[in-house]
């Protein structure tokens, strides 16, 4: 745990299969009636769980970011912070960690959907580099519109990745 200004901060870590029950509970409290059921979370975990991050405080899960990384793109399938921990920057920390994981996987873009009426979530994503990419009036069915947001990841391959350099110098074109 990190202590700053006398306040104990939640610890961010990779998710484990043992976190699924707590993730499912927070998912249900946050997103009912559209919450992922436990069985779907289990299957998503088996495929993408190595990219998931959770926040815990005193051994209790207080937030998560569910990431699905593909070959060139990633999806943020879910991001939630328990009610008692909201407004403290934890959502931003989880999102930053998820974006960093996607960057390390060399994806070009990360997508997420957000309910158009959820201004706090939209602001969080905007502050983290996401931009509006579209709108679908019935994304999750009748009466369930979503805005599609995207975070494009730009890489400076020549400056940061030595595989793209010839010779010994930082920029040796010879």
Image: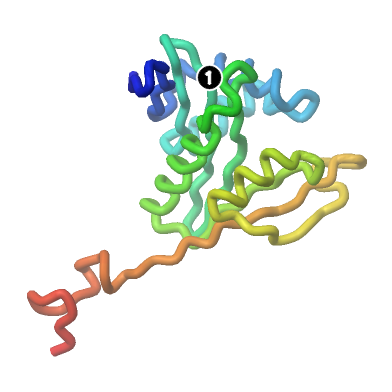
Q: Residue at left 39%, top 23%?
A: 11
Residue at the farthest right position = 142
Q: Please state, as top left, top right, bottom left or bottom right, where the C terminus lies in the image.
A: bottom left
The residue to which callout 1 is attached is 62
Q: Residue at left 53%, top 56%?
A: 73
Left or right, residue 137 beside residue 133 = right
Left or right, residue 158 beside residue 129 = left
Quadrant of the rendered image containing residue 117: top right
Quadrant of the rendered image containing residue 149: bottom right
Looking at the picture, tell me which residue is in the foreground, 35 or 59: 59
Left or right, residue 102 beside residue 44 = left
Q: Please state, as top left, top right, bottom left or bottom right, where the N terminus lies in the image.
A: top left
Looking at the picture, tell me which residue is in the foreground, 126 or 164: 126
Q: Position of residue 112 (x, y in %)?
A: 64, 48
Secondary structure under the numbered disc 1 in the rendered image: strand
Count of numbered badges drawn on the protein: 1
The color scheme shown is rainbow
Tell me: residue 38, above or below residue 106: above
Q: Position of residue 95 (x, y in %)?
A: 51, 40
Q: Position of residue 145 (x, y in %)?
A: 84, 46
- Local packing at callout 1 (Cα closer than 10 Å; few below 14, some 14-19, many 20+) is many
Q: Residue at left 54%, top 49%?
A: 128
Looking at the picture, tell me which residue is in the foreground, 134 or 120: 120
Residue at the farthest front position = 5
Residue at the farthest left position = 168
Q: Position of residue 104 (x, y in %)?
A: 36, 51
Q: Residue at left 47%, top 34%?
A: 52
């Amino acid at each position: 745990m990190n202590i700053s200004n006398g306040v104990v901060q939640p610890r961010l870590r990779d998710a484990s299969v043992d976190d699924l029950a707590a993730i499912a509970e927070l998912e249900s409290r946050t997103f009912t009636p559209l919450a992922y059921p436990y069985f779907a979370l289990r299957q998503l975990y088996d495929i993408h769980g190595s990219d998931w991050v959770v926040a815990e405080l005193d051994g209790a899960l207080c937030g998560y970011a569910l990431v699905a990384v593909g070959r060139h793109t990633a999806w943020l399938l879910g991001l939630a912070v328990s009610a008692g921990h909201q407004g403290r920057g934890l959502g931003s920390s989880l999102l930053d960690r998820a974006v960093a994981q996607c960057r390390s996987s060399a994806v070009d873009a990360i997508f997420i959907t957000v309910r158009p009426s959820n201004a706090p979530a939209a602001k969080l994503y905007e502050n983290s580099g996401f931009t509006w990419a579209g709108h679908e009036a019935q994304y999750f069915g009748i009466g369930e519109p979503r805005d599609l947001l995207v975070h494009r990841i730009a890489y400076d391959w020549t400056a940061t990745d030595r595989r793209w350099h010839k010779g010994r110098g930082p920029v040796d074109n010879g």
